[in-house]
Each structure stands twice: as C-alpha cells, then as structure tokens.
Image (cartoon, rainbow, N blue to C red):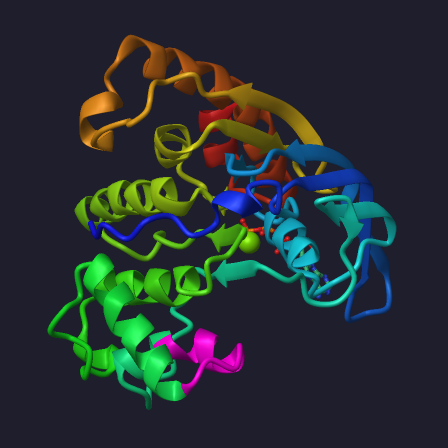
Amino acid sequence: MGNDPPTRLGDVKAGHVRFEGVTKRFVSPVGQTMTALHDVNLEILPGQFCAIVGPTGCGKSTTLTMLAGLDRPSAGKVTVSDQIVSGITKGVSFMFQADALLPWRSVVTNVSLGPIFNKVPQKDALEMARNWLRIVGLSGFEQHYPHQLSGGMRKRASLAAALINKPSILLMDEPFSALDVQTRSIMSNELLTLWERDRPTVLFVTHDLEEAIGLADKVVVITAGPGTVKAIFDIDLPRPRGALQEIRFQPRFLQLHQQIWEALRDEVQRTYARQGAPVAAKETIA
Ligand SMILES: Nc1ncnc2c1ncn2[C@@H]1O[C@H](COP(=O)(O)OP(=O)(O)OP(=O)(O)O)[C@@H](O)[C@H]1O
Ligand SMILES: [Mg+2]
C-alpha cells in the first residue's frame, strides 16, 4: 500500500522505551490502595514490535498509559530514548479499542486533526489526510462520516489518524478486538505493511496469542495483578510474515504458541479463580 518513502530514517533511536522498576498504585473508590503493577522491568528497542499479553486487570492498559505520559508511576521510571516521561510523550500515537474518531466530522477531517494540532496549515493537513486515506485503502470515502463506514474501515481510518503524525512510538490497546475474525486478520496484515514503512516502536496489547505471535518481534507475558513481567519470548519467525491464517500452522509458530500459553495459562487461571468463577468452571480449567 502506498509508495511514499519513509520519512524518519534519521530518527531511528527516537522510540527506545524502558520501564525500570515501575510500580503503579491506585486508590480505589472506597479509599483502599491497590497495586496494579509491581516492579516492571522492560526494554523495547527502537522499531521493535512488542506484544503484551496477560489476564484481564493485570495492568496492560496502565503500562501504555504511563508510557504515553497520561499517568505517572508510583515508583521507578519510564523513559523514552533516555528521557524520563513527564507530561504527554512527544512522538506517541495511541490507538484504543474503541474508535476515537469524532462522529460529527468527516473521515478526512478526522484524519487531518493530528497535523492541524501540530500547526500544519489546514489545506496541507487535508492533503496529508487524503494521502493517508489512500495508503490505508479508503480513497473515495474521504467525505463519509464514521457511522457510514464498516467497523474495519473505521479501524483503517483510526490507523491513518495515528500514523499521519509519523509517531516514533505507536501504542495499540486491543485495537482490533471488536472486529470479526476475518477483518481482524486482514487488519493485522495491513498493520504490518504500514509498520514496515516507517518502523515505529509498537506496544500492542492483545488477548489473542495468535495475533501477538503473528505480529510481534517479542511477546511479553504479564502476571495476574499486581502485574509484573513473567516472561519475554523472542519471536524468530521470518519477516515478511505473510497472512496469519497461513503461518499459524507452521511448526515454529505452534511451538511458540505452546510455550507462551504455558506461561500465560497459570496467570489466567489465577485471575479467573479470584473473580469467583463458578465451581464447575473452575474444575474444568484446573
Ligand atoms: N484510574 C484508576 N483508578 C483506580 N484503579 C485503576 C485505575 N486504572 C486502572 N485501575 C486498576 O488497575 C488494574 C489494572 O488495570 P488495567 O486497565 O491496566 O488492566 P488491563 O490489563 O488493561 O485489563 P483488561 O485486559 O481487562 O483491559 C485493575 O485492577 C484496575 O481496576
Ligand atoms: Mg486494558
């Protein structure tokens, strides 16, 4: 898709992410302090694609939020290219599970918002947005409103809105979880193609192990809360990866899946048990 040259070649060190001894505590609505993350140590090299998996409530979203500078650690430090994160982190785009498109704006004006906030003149910003819509395969839909697009098309528009800012770090919090299986797998392939253009550092949160292995250079498994890094798996599958539907039956893929699931399973079970699962269900997963 698209043939624009990468524009960040001189900027390859920009997305070096480090979490060092990061703990995050919250005060609950009833005034109790709870530890969401405990002593997280993690390094993600510039241009790496890192998937984060872990049971619900283990602190995955909190990890991304602190990297974006939307929240601070209670202890330890988060750095981007050796600078401690304080305030909104420059060069970061965040893509959430829910669409973040403004419903009252056309697709092209939605996508142009990033450059406009960055003081690009409106005419140029709209031109950039049209170009990005072409890259993500939405030419002809510029004047549509978000509700006039399918779920997959809205994700493409959100991707264009995230990538138009040429982020050095792209944070994605379960971005495709609301999509059907086929659209999701198409979006995964498209994401990889786009990532290979400019190579931002990516932190991609997912509950789907196949998606994590298919996309990432490394998969980080977080423990049941308070979350900490349990294991990190290097995904040595060759790139370009090809369609997830085709590579997921390769022996190395299956082997990695087995290993990562073994690390993840106990954490999922612990969370499930804590949440008071029905007795019969507990017996099934134990
Ligand atoms: N602002 C907040 N105030 C109080 N508690 C919070 C806050 N944000 C998160 N938490 C708590 O921190 C823990 C981790 O939350 P987080 O949203 O990071 O989990 P998660 O791994 O993203 O879960 P999921 O997979 O369900 O999205 C949870 O117990 C949550 O209730
Ligand atoms: Mg979350």
100 w.r.t. 40: above or below: below
- In this view of the protein, can residue 223 be seen by the observer? no
Asked if the magenta segment contains residue 268, the reply would be: no
The magenta-colored residue range is 112-121
The residue positioned 61% from the left and 39% from the top of the image is 271
- Which of 77/212 is in front? 77
- Which of 168/74 is in front? 168
The residue positioned 55% from the left and 41% from the top of the image is 12
Main secondary structure found in the magenta portion = helix
Q: Left or right: 220 with respect to 86? A: left
Q: Left or right: 168 with respect to 130? A: right
Residue 13 place in picture, x, y as percent: 61, 41
Q: Quadrant of ligand 2?
A: bottom right
Task: Name, please, the residue furthest toward the front.
Answer: 10
33 w.r.t. 55: above or below: below
Residue 50 place in picture, x, y as percent: 52, 36
Asked if the magenta segment contains residue 120, the reply would be: yes
